[in-house]
C-alpha cells in the first residue's frame, strides 16, 4: 500500500523519512477513509512530543497521495532484535518496557490510544533509547472514523476487548505492552496461534502460560506485574501507563523495592538560574533544530530554566542529539558563534519591555521579508519576537535567528534598511 523513503529537508538541512501511501490503488469511500486515517496519524503523532516517540514534522498530498515527513531514526525494531536473540535479560526487557510505557503515557494524556503496540513499532537505538512509531491506527477518543465493532490491530498483541471489536481505552495499550514484555522475557508470545481464530480463542478464554516456566530469571514480583497487565478485564489491569511503569521501576536494582533502609538527602537550595538573552536562545535553538527538528524550541526552553551557565545549557542539549558526530557538530557550531550576551544581566524589566513595542508598520515589513524565508509561520514568529524584544534591533535579530542559511539571514537583516 505504500513506501518509506529516506529524504533530505533542504530548509533545515536534515535527513527525514517520508511515509507515502498510494491511495490510487483505492477508490470511492475507501480512498477517502484512508486519506482521513492517514491525516489523523499526522495529527495524532504531531501532538505527541516525547523523546520516546518518533516525531512527525509535516503532512501533505503528492499527486493525491498523502505523505508524512517524519523524524529519521537509524535503528532496528524490537521484532528484529527478538528474531536474533530470542530472549532479553529481565533488566533489559524492563528498561525497554518502561520507555514504551513512558511514550504511551504521553499519548494517553492527550486522549490518544495507539491500538497497535507490537515489537515492529518499537525502535531500538544504539544508545539504548526506545522510540515508538506508527500511530496509523491510533485514534482520538472523540473521533468518529473508527467505530466500535471494527477490529484493527495485530492479533497476537490485541487486548480481549479489542479482539471483540469493542471500544478500547488506554488500558488496551497496557495489555499489549504486557504481551510485548512477556515475549521479550520468554521468547514466545503468550497467546500463539496459526490463524486469527486460534489466537482469538486463547486470548479470550485461556490464561497465558506462567512466565516463570519460560524464564527462570523472572522474579515473582515481575511475574505478578505481567499477570496483572494481561488481565482479561480492563478494570483488573493497571489504571495508567505511569502506574505500570512505576511498578516495573520498583524492580530496578537499588530501587525502592530493593532497599531495606532509606537515606534522607537534604537538598541544597538551587543555584540561581541565569536569564539567558532571547537572541542567545534563538541562536542555540536554530542550531539544535538542524539535528532534532521542531522539538528544539521546547528542549532549549526547558534546559534554559535549569542550566546555570551557557556551557551547562549546551552540555544538556548535546545529550538530546542521538548521533555522536552530530553532537560534535552542534557543540562546534555553538562555540563558533559563542553569543556574548549569554546572560542578560542588563535586561530591561517587564514593564520596560511592554513600553518597547515594535511599531505595526515595522512588524508588517519584517513579516513580508521573513515569509520569503520561512513561509506562513512568519506571522507567528513576528508576534512572538515583538512581545519578547526590548528594542527594534533585537526584534530583527530574533527573527533572523529562525533563518538557517547564513546568506539568507544576512539578506533579511539588510532588508531592514
Image (cartoon, grey):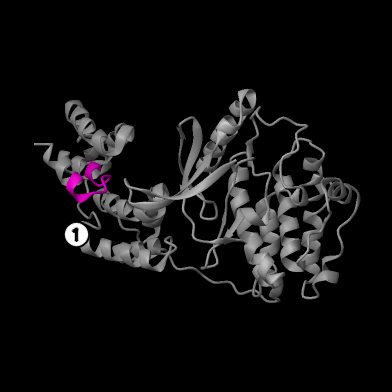
Q: Is residue 128 left or right of residue 7?
A: right
Above or below, 288 relative to 267:
above
Q: Is residue 401 magenta?
A: yes
Q: Residue at x 25, y 57 (%)?
A: 343
Q: Is residue 191 magenta?
A: no
Nearer to us in this view, 110 or 276: 110
Quarter occupied by residue 326: bottom left
Describe the element under mark 1 as helix, strand or loop: loop
Q: Is residue 44 visible?
A: yes
Quarter occupied by residue 85: bottom right
Q: Is residue 48 left or right of residue 371?
A: right
Q: Which segment did they paint magenta?
A: 399-408
Q: Is residue 101 visible?
A: no
Q: Tell me the quarter of the image containing the N terminus.
A: top right
Nearer to us in this view, 310 or 44: 44
Residue 173 location (% of width, % of height): 70, 48
Amino acid at each position: 500500500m505504500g513506501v518509506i523513503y529516506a529524504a533530505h529537508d533542504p530548509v533545515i538541512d536534515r535527513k527525514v523519512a517520508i511515509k507515502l501511501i498510494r491511495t490510487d490503488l483505492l477508490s470511492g469511500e475507501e480512498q477517502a477513509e484512508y486519506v482521513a486515517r492517514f491525516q489523523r496519524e499526522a495529527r495524532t503523532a504531531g501532538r505527541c512530543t516525547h523523546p520516546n516517540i518518533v516525531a512527525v514534522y509535516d503532512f501533505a498530498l503528492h499527486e493525491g497521495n498523502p505523505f508524512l515527513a517524519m523524524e529519521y531514526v537509524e535503528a532496528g525494531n524490537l521484532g528484529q532484535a527478538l528474531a536474533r536473540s530470542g530472549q532479553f535479560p529481565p533488566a533489559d526487557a524492563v528498561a525497554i518496557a518502561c520507555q514504551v510505557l513512558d511514550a504511551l503515557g504521553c499519548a494517553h494524556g492527550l486522549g490518544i490510544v495507539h491500538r497497535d503496540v507490537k515489537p515492529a513499532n518499537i525502535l531500538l537505538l544504539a544508545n539504548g533509547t526506545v522510540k515508538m512509531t506508527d500511530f496509523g491506527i491510533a485514534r482520538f477518543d472523540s473521533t468518529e472514523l473508527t467505530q466500535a465493532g471494527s477490529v484493527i490491530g495485530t492479533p497476537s498483541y490485541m487486548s480481549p476487548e479489542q479482539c471483540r471489536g469493542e471500544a478500547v481505552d488506554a488500558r488496551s495499550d497496557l495489555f499489549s505492552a504486557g504481551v510485548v514484555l512477556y515475549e521479550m522475557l520468554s521468547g514466545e508470545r503468550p497467546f500463539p496461534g496459526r490463524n486469527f481464530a486460534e489466537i482469538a480463542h486463547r486470548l479470550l478464554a485461556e490464561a497465558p502460560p506462567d512466565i516463570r516456566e519460560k524464564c527462570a530469571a523472572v522474579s515473582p514480583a515481575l511475574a505478578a506485574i505481567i499477570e496483572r497487565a494481561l488481565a482479561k478485564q480492563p478494570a483488573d489491569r493497571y489504571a495508567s501507563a505511569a502506574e505500570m511503569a512505576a511498578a516495573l521501576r520498583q524492580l530496578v536494582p537499588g530501587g525502592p523495592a530493593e532497599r531495606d533502609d532509606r537515606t534522607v538527602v537534604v537538598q541544597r537550595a538551587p543555584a540561581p538560574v541565569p536569564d539567558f538573552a532571547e537572541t542567545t536562545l534563538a541562536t542555540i535553538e536554530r542550531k539544535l533544530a538542524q539535528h532534532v527538528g521542531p522539538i528544539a524550541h521546547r528542549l532549549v526552553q526547558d534546559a534554559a530554566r535549569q542550566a546555570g551557565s551557557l556551557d551547562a545549557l549546551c552540555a544538556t542539549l548535546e545529550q538530546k542529539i542521538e548521533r555522536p558526530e552530530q553532537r560534535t557538530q552542534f557543540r562546534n557550531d555553538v562555540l563558533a558563534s559563542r553569543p556574548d550576551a549569554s546572560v542578560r544581566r542588563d535586561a530591561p524589566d517587564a514593564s520596560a519591555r511592554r513600553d518597547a513595542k515594535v511599531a505595526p508598520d515595522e512588524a508588517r515589513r519584517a513579516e513580508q521579508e521573513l515569509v520569503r524565508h520561512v513561509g506562513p509561520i512568519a506571522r507567528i514568529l513576528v508576534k512572538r519576537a515583538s512581545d519578547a524584544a526590548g528594542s527594534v534591533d533585537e526584534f530583527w535579530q530574533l527573527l533572523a535567528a529562525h533563518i538557517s542559511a547564513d546568506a539568507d539571514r544576512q539578506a533579511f537583516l539588510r532588508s531592514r534598511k
